[in-house]
Image: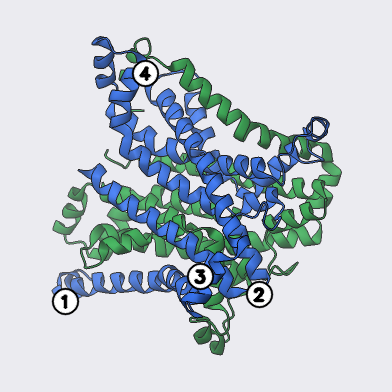
Amino acid sequence: MQTLAMDPTRTRMMPRLLIGVAVVVTLLIVVAPLIYIFARAFAEGWQVYAANLMDPSTVHAIWLTSIVALIVVPINIAFGIAAAWAVARFRFPGRSLLVTAIEIPFSISPIIAGICYLLLYGRQGILGPWMQANDLQVMFALPGIVLVTMFVTAPFVAREVLPLMQAQGSEQEQAALTLGASGWQMFARVTLPNIRWALLYGAVLCTARAVGEFGGVSVVSGNIRGQTNTLPLHVELLFNDLNATGAFAAASVLTLLALVALVVKAVLEGRRGA
Amino acid sequence: MSQAAAPVRAKRVLPGFTLSLGTTLLYLTVIILIPVLALILKGAEIGPARFWAIVTAPRAVAAFQVTITAAVIATLFNAVYGLLMAWVLVRYEFPGKRILDALMDIPFALPTAVAGLSLTALFSANGWIGQFLEPQGISIVYTIWGVALAMAFTSVPFVVRTVQPVLEDLDPAYEQAARTLGASEGAIFARVVFPQILPAWLAGCTIAFARSLGEFGAIVFIAGNLPMKTEIAALLAFIRLEEFDYQGASAIALVLLLFALVLLVVSNRLQAWAMRFKGA
């Protein structure tokens, strides 16, 4: 074995074999599904594709999904900054427990998150009677979709900003305070510029996740066509209607968003490295 | 943790402690803690006897079996494929390497429903890939293999992205020493490299397994959702909800929640162990 290892042809063969296997498997299970979405979406030509996207229920689904993302992502950014600041800059009892708590949504299935919300706000839920008495509707409406999406995406920004804040330390911020800056001035002129790429990166990931959320939203939305149907739910609806081309057309919009997110991520990673 | 010294001194200087911690706790309480508590409270109302009856009913047992079996298959596949990807991406230079690296983020970024839709069509009997498998007697769609495929797709980045940074940070001195002493490349990997990446690899596999147990969106398309055969636990909980059987749904969801929390603790332990090998 030892003499074989010294053989140069053998050591050159191994990397090629490994790279070859890695590339082939990735082509089959990652690249093929990606290409297939566009192939099927455009299978009947541009006009059918455009007509599928212009369908009122599809337009409504795109609109609803955008609204959800526009509400969830800014709130998530604020939460992410607050959580990272508290954990990176201060020591307090239960700090590591807090970090674990922020990560909880990563390990809980979105469908369980949806069930949790239904058991809290639903008609038979813990707050159900009170909500009915006050004529509040969370389930099967926009607030429920927003809340579940907030649950699912909670860790995204915090997880990107926290390690960076920890690595940067607080010297610059302390210097700003010593020079007479107020807390908010320090935040706007020192903290925010320092974390801006990680923040943007987290926001991009959060947006991708918020737009694509399926399991949790399918529990709380009630799938009311033209009302509480988000774009991923609409894909399923069209698929169950046996309108495969329509389903792939709707899916292609989501795929395009995912690809944009990945390109932005690649660009940001280049910046962060520099 | 290594930053321990600076924040301690900073505690009295930096502003925003109450505001940031208050916001964080409020958000976590309202968005995560109270809803999860609602599930636990509702689950406690069921009572142990009824709870046991629900989760040991034949259809529920079958659903748990399908979920766990498929998740084990998917995790075993990803343990190999994920490790291979991490190794290839860190150790070799080749054209298209950056693209291959970026492709490993697709399963994270692509909505699971979209992935499920596409995989179903690709691997069905007349699909691009399925047409070659079907004559060999290999059916993917509407079988447990389809469930496992959907799980593998959505969870592979967890293995790659956990192993990759540890592999990048390995001290090359040990490998060079082993090479100098005449060890073969295989022996170097097995006895020098692998023990160092083992904790990270196990952590990645644990996260991938946890993710597979909870996966829903990709699976509902490809599984066919036949009770007792390809129905996963998360879907059964969903069906119970649609039947307004809230106790049935909560009991199954609680079992899944328990799995998730146990696996979270295990993967945290493994990652803490892995950190000892990183940059040490």
Return the disc, 4 or 2, that comes first in the chain's sequence.
4
**Residue B205 relative to residue A223: left or right:** left
Mark yes or no: residue B54 visible.
Answer: yes
Residue A242 marker: 2
**Residue receiving disc 1:** A9
CA neighbours of label 1 inside 10 A, class few (<14), some (14 to 19), many (20+): few
Tell me how far mark 1 sits from mark 2, CA to CA: 54 Å
Residue A16 versus residue B205 in the image, above or below: below
Q: Residue at x 28, y 29 (%)?
A: A168
How many marks the image carries: the answer is 4
Q: In the rendered view of the protein, which quadrant contains the C terminus of chain A? A: top left
* Chain assigned blue: A
Residue A7: give x, y in percent of width and height.
Answer: 15, 74
Q: Are marks 4 and 2 on the same chain?
A: yes
Instruction: Identify residue type, mark 3.
Output: Ala
Residue at image coords 37%, 37%: A199
Secondary-structure class at tag 4: helix
Q: Nearer the viewer, residue A60 or A260?
A: A60
Of the residues tagged 1 and 2, which is closer to the observer? 2
Q: Quadrant of the N terminus of chain A?
A: bottom left
Residue A243 at x, y percent in the picture: 63, 74
Which residue is found at the position 29% from the left and 70% from the top?
A: A19
Q: Are marks 3 and 4 on the same chain?
A: yes
Q: Earlier in the sequence, mark 3 or mark 4?
A: 3
Among numbered discs 1 and 2, the one appearing first in the sequence: 1
Q: Quadrant of residue A15?
A: bottom left
Report which residue position mark 3 lands on.
A50
Residue B266 position (above or below residue B97): above
